[in-house]
Image: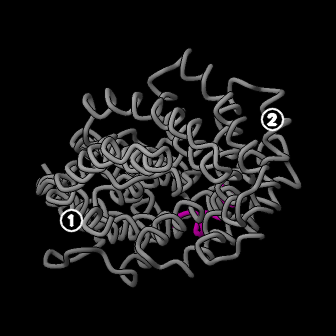
């Protein structure tokens, strides 16, 4: 399929005088000489081909867990590398898509429907990161930013910068990731100032993300302040539209708990996590598929906060509940949830030791190691150092 698309694109470009028969992609210089009608037709054609390819990619992605419908708002703290492997078919499809994106960018896509295309590519970028194709994810994210810049679409640019910051962070380019995230926050501040109803939620989400980046550089107080600012926005949003914003409020509370705990045992960290659990419980009861994993994660975090205050029995009970949620999830979707099960088991082992049960702690730890060995055999780049 992908070779056919490549041949079709080349033939169409030659037909419109955009490239010679032996040229693999249209050059920027040749594009400037094209008649406007041919230019517009070519943009439309490339866009349709990229849309077809991204749909094909979605259909052949391995089991990597839930896809990211709003990648620009993904907090990397809530994202774990999964165990799906990129197939040759997927690699070829991604390569062809990135070629066409480069072609599209080279002819200055001012009239492009950037929101549609960039949304597709943004979702693709983070899913590629989870598959270990992080260079490709970065390339896709960079192109999306360029598309939005060319289209002078400020909301789209802010969103794509947020998404690109995550791609950079996952590549280990953390200074660039932080700077890109700061650029996104700055754009969202301006947008939220002019249209708070539309953009305050976006600003809040970008603040939760940048708080993690501040934390990664040891800037713990700034990380707390970013989370607290986000929380001050989420509370009224969740009060007004709980069906939409309660999950975001809970996620922000978990992040705030983690950021406060980095300053040392903190009563506010425990209270924030307890509130998050109280939000996730009814959400998980009413909509278990999307929210039981969130409840489990918040319970693991709560167990850590309780442990910090010497409340070891309560910590053990909270984490035991999380393990009980993760076991069936990992059995049904190992690619998505086996890493989380292993992590919760290690935490459980620690709490068992705190309670004096060394024998059970050893057994639980051995189960976690067994899971990690299996994961490392499949994806050493992600799991060999855990």
Residue 351, x across and y down, in percent: 48, 46
Of all residues, the one furthest to the front in this rendering is: 356
SS at badge 1:
helix
Mark 1 or mark 2: name the one nearer the start of the chain: 2
Of all residues, the one furthest to the top in this rendering is: 286
Q: From this viewpoint, is residue 5 visible?
A: no
Q: Which residue is mark 2?
A: 237
Q: Is residue 297 left or right of residue 263?
A: left
Residue at (62% x, 63% y) in the render: 212
Q: From this viewpoint, is residue 116 visible?
A: yes
- Residue 384 included in the magenta stretch of the image: no
Residue 47, x across and y down, in percent: 39, 52
Report the span colored magenta. Answer: 147-155
Q: Which residue is mark 1?
A: 380
* Mark 1 residue crowding within 10 angstroms, few (<14) / some (14–19) / many (20+): some
Magenta stretch secondary structure, dominant: helix
Residue at (71% x, 70% y) in the render: 220
* Mark 2 residue crowding within 10 angstroms, few (<14) / some (14–19) / many (20+): some
Q: Quadrant of the C terminus?
A: bottom left
Disc marking residue 179: none
Residue 149, x across and y down, in percent: 60, 68
Q: Nearer the viewer, residue 110 or 58?
A: 58
Q: Nearer the viewer, residue 218 or 55?
A: 218
């Amino acid at each position: 399929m992908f070779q056919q698309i490549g041949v079709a694109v080349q033939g169409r470009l030659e037909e419109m005088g955009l490239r010679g028969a032996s040229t693999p992609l249209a050059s920027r210089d040749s594009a400037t000489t094209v008649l406007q009608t041919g230019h517009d037709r070519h943009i439309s054609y490339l866009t349709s081909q990229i849309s077809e390819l991204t749909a094909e990619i979605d259909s052949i992605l391995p089991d990597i867990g839930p896809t990211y419908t709003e990648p620009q708002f993904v907090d990397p703290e809530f994202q774990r590398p999964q165990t799906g492997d990129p197939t040759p078919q997927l690699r070829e499809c991604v390569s062809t898509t990135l070629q066409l994106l480069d072609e599209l960018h080279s002819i200055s896509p001012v009239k492009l429907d950037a929101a549609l295309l960039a949304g597709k590519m943004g979702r693709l970028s983070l899913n590629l990161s989870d598959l270990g194709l992080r260079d490709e994810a970065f390339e896709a994210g960079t192109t999306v930013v360029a598309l939005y810049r060319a289209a002078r679409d400020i909301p789209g640019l802010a969103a794509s910068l947020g998404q690109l910051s995550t791609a950079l962070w996952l590549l280990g380019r953390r200074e660039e990731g932080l700077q890109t995230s700061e650029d996104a926050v700055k754009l969202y501040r301006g947008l939220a100032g002019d249209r708070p109803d539309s953009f305050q939620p976006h600003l809040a989400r970008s603040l939760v993300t940048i708080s993690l980046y501040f934390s990664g550089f040891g800037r713990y107080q700034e990380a707390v302040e970013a989370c607290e600012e986000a929380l001050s926005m989420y509370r009224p949003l969740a009060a007004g539209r709980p069906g939409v914003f309660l999950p975001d409020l809970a996620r922000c509370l978990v992040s705030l708990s983690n950021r406060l705990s980095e300053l040392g045992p903190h009563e506010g960290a425990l209270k924030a996590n307890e509130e998050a659990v109280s939000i996730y419980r009814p959400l998980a009861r009413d909509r278990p598929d999307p929210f039981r994993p969130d409840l489990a994660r918040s319970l693991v975090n709560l167990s850590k906060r309780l442990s910090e205050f010497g409340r070891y029995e309560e910590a053990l009970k909270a984490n035991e509940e999380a393990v009980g949620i993760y076991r069936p999830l990992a059995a049904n979707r190992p690619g998505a949830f086996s890493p989380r099960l292993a992590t919760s088991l290690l935490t459980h082992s620690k709490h068992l030791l705190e309670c004096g049960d060394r024998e059970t702690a050893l057994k639980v730890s051995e189960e976690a190691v067994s899971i990690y060995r299996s994961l490392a055999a499949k994806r050493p780049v992600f799991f060999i150092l855990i």
